[in-house]
Image: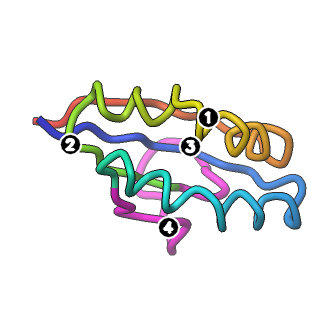
Amino acid sequence: MAAYVIVDIEVTNPEAYEDYRSQVPPLVTKYGGKYLSRGGEMEMLEGDWAPKRLVVLEFPSFERAKEFYNSEEYGPVKAIRLNSTISKMVLVDGV
């Protein structure tokens, strides 16, 4: 069953974040993931949630998404994101 990583990102260091953006796609692909949305146009429909930049990734399974997130390869790249953004991230099973 597919699983989804949903990330609300506020970029605080654009130069470093560009470095992250250039390094992460091959890792996402390596773990079977794909981008469904990567900071596209948004429109608030309900509530008061106001994400700055929304990214949605699909992985083949919950376990595969966790393997990506916890992988040795992603560790140093994740550090770039953590130091150049304020991020909120969730992993959710699909139906």
Residue pushed farthest bottom? 41
For the residues labelled 1 and 2, the Cα–Cα distance comes to 21 Å
- Mark toward the viewer: 1 or 3: 1
Judged from the image, the secondary structure of the residue bearing numbered disc 1 is strand
Q: Are marks 4 and 3 in contact (CB under 8 Å)?
A: no
Identity, as a three-letter code, of the amino acid under mark 1:
Lys
Identity, as a three-letter code, of the amino acid under mark 3:
Trp
For marks 2 and 4, the one nearer the N-term is 4
For marks 1 and 4, the one nearer the N-term is 4
Give me the residue at 85% from left, 59% from top. Answer: 16
Q: Which residues are magenta?
A: 34-54
Left or right, 71 with reference to 33: right
Give me the residue at 45% from left, 43% from top. Answer: 6
Which residue is denoted by mark 1 in the rendering? Answer: 88
Give me the residue at 52% from left, 31% from top. Answer: 71
Identity, as a three-letter code, of the amino acid under mark 2:
Pro
Which residue is denoted by mark 2 in the rendering? Answer: 60
Numbered mark located on residue 66 in the image:
none
Left or right, 55 with reference to 14: left
Magenta-drawn stretch, dominant element (helix, strand or loop): loop
For the residues labelled 4 and 3, the Cα–Cα distance comes to 11 Å
- Is 68 rendered above or below residue 27? above
Numbered mark located on residue 49 in the image:
3
For the residues labelled 1 and 4, the Cα–Cα distance comes to 17 Å
Mark 3, other Cα within 10 Å: few <14 / some 14–19 / many ≥20:
few
Where residue 46 appears, as percent x and y from the top left, is: 42, 48
